[in-house]
Amino acid sequence: MIEPPPATLKVALNLLNATSLVPMMAVLAVPKPRPTRKAEMVDVLRRRLTVETLKELWEQLDEKQQLAVAETLYGDGGRFDASRFRVKYGDLPQGIGEYGPVKSPLLRCFLQSPDRSRGLSPSVPRDLAEKLRKFVSEPPDAVLESVAECPDVALREQPSGYGKEPTFEDVALVRRDMEQAAVQDLFAVLRLIDQGRLAVSARTRRPSAKTVERIGEVLQGGDFFKASGKRRRRNDDAGPIRGFAWPWLVQAGGLAELAGGGKLLLTAQGRKAFSAPPWETLRQVWRRWLNSSLLDEFSRMDEVKGQFRGRGRGALTSAPRRRAVVAEGIKECPPGRWVEVDELFRFMYATDLDFSVTRDPWTLYLVDQEYGSFGYDNNGGGDELELRYFLCVLFEYAATLGLVDVAFTDPCGARRDFTSRWGADYVSFLSRYDGLELIRLNPLGAYCLGMARRYEPSTPPVKGRLSLFTDLRVRASSDLSADERLLIETYARAEAEGVWRLDIDRALSAIESGHDATQLRDFLDTRDEQPLPETVEAFLRRLEQGASALTRRGQAFLIECASERVADEITANPNAARYCLRAGRLRLVVPAESEAKFRKAVHLLGYAVPPN
């Protein structure tokens, strides 16, 4: 608990030594002979610090000193926060030391800190605060810098020898626009679950390596990183990110649950997602994941040891509370503009949107528990542990669900804030997310975060031109963007470089995965300057008719009777016949929602339905 500032200026001045009060009398031009007894000094200074005098002294302060007074005067707790000030303005004002004591006699007239350190930062006494508020304005709000266009490269510091100046070089950025990708990924993952191809641990709910690999194969554009499969001394492989996140997201979002044998099984909500607007499903998953306790994603910091045992596990803070802070931080991003993640992290801390990963950093360490402890230099705000957790939520969950677009590099050597730590020689990066450089809040993200009341699905911008032929071939007459190429490959098969052929089986599979049949028509219409050939029109009509001809109405189970007589008896009974359909000589189809009523009906006939 932060101790409140002194109630009066008199109390604050009495906490100073006489050697500190004498220079203050000089600043206030107390005429000689000046008092020498401390009580008299305090009385003279208190009477001299009038509103008019304070205004004159205010003009003598430099800009950062004035900001320090304003931040303390209007900040929470009434005390100067040195670390937050440094983050917001870049450096501390002249006259305030690293740990808070006020050294400038002029600044002591505004900010008071006791000479005998009690671990208290400078503050403004309450009666002095009333005078200052008459002419001191509130400090400016922190500003979040952003850019309209994503840069092509990031500046990377290169390793240098001891005592040498660091060198820098440009590293190419990989950009991924995730709004469209998340929609396709959602249906692809649900389809894998529906086919019984995804498995998780029955105890930890952690996806198996095969599950992560299978998801990576169906993700639009593939995962951000792929494991090389080679065993190395250093952690050179970032490994999967989106492929790991999806099993957790569908479980936390209520779309899938653990079934027998460790397989994931779609819930009723998961089955409804096939016909529901995907952006509504993604918003539901995001909101439920924020409050989920299935996984603390800080566990993905593989190099941070001590978090799974003893005091380390008990010292970790609440993951849902951390996520909520990060979500609020994302909402500060201007939609449609790129923001550096370091700038966003700085802005969040400067505006009190900060959090702690652990209540006891001494329990966490790198390589060695004694020498590599994070407790040696943990400073609360802006710490490397909190930054890594922040990057994880952005990169592995917000980006996977399509809320933000990302620009990143390989994590090896991307951040050097930990390289001076004991044991850093054994690791290439502190987290697999270290390469994340910029994010962009897109329209889907604004909707999921509650910043927009409605969401209009966006279509890829027209960049390339197409030529369509009567034999259903599609040829690119100019370079297509990655988004355009991925979209056309959803409905057509590649025949040669820049040439595809529309394929009804592939197109219907896309419809089954959740794509809209009108998406292809709009895409072709806007990229071919000529009217669509009649054969292409016929293909599109057939696709649109096929997309709406069948409707999924839920699940059912198939029962085989021992004889045709038993089947006849059940279907002839009015109570039982209401809940089943005949399917051949011996088989009955029972809708899943009618199972309980069907069982009761056949019980009256003397039959038992075997368990699933």
Image (tube, rainbow, N blue to C red):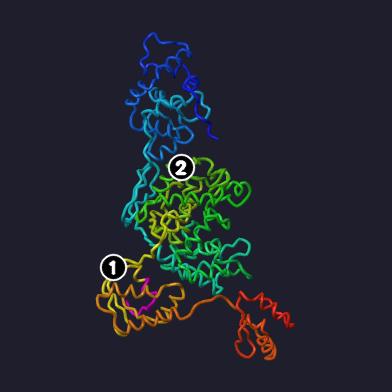
Element under label 2? loop
Which image quarter: residue 50? Answer: top left
Residue 577 showing in the rendered view: yes
Mark number displayed over residue 463: 1
Q: Amino acid at mark 1?
A: Lys
User: Residues under labels 2 and 1: Cα distance?
Assistant: 42 Å
Which image quarter: residue 102? Answer: top left
- The single residue placed furthest to the top in the displayed view is 33
Q: Could you tell me which residue is drawn at 51 percent across and 26 percent down?
A: 117
Looking at the image, is 25 positioned above or below residue 223? above
Q: Amino acid at mark 2?
A: Asp
Mark number displayed over residue 298: none
Viewport quadrant of the C terminus: bottom right
Q: Work out whether residue 460 or residue 134 is closer to the camera in this orientation and state it.
A: 134
- The single residue placed furthest to the front in the displayed view is 574
Mark number displayed over residue 352: 2
Neighbours of disc 2 within 10 Å: few (<14), some (14-19), many (20+): few
Q: Is residue 240 magenta?
A: no
Q: Which residues are magenta?
A: 486-497
Residue 65 showing in the rendered view: no
Q: Is residue 496 magenta?
A: yes
- Please tell me how many numbered marks the rendered image carries: 2
Which image quarter: residue 375? Answer: top right
Looking at the image, is 201 positioned above or below residue 293? below
Q: What percent of the width, then of the height, locates residue 227? A: 47, 64
Q: Is residue 244 left or right of residue 23?
A: right
Of the image marks 2 and 1, the number of the one nearer the N terminus: 2
Looking at the image, is 474 positioned above or below residue 180? below
Q: What percent of the width, then of the height, locates residue 528? A: 27, 75
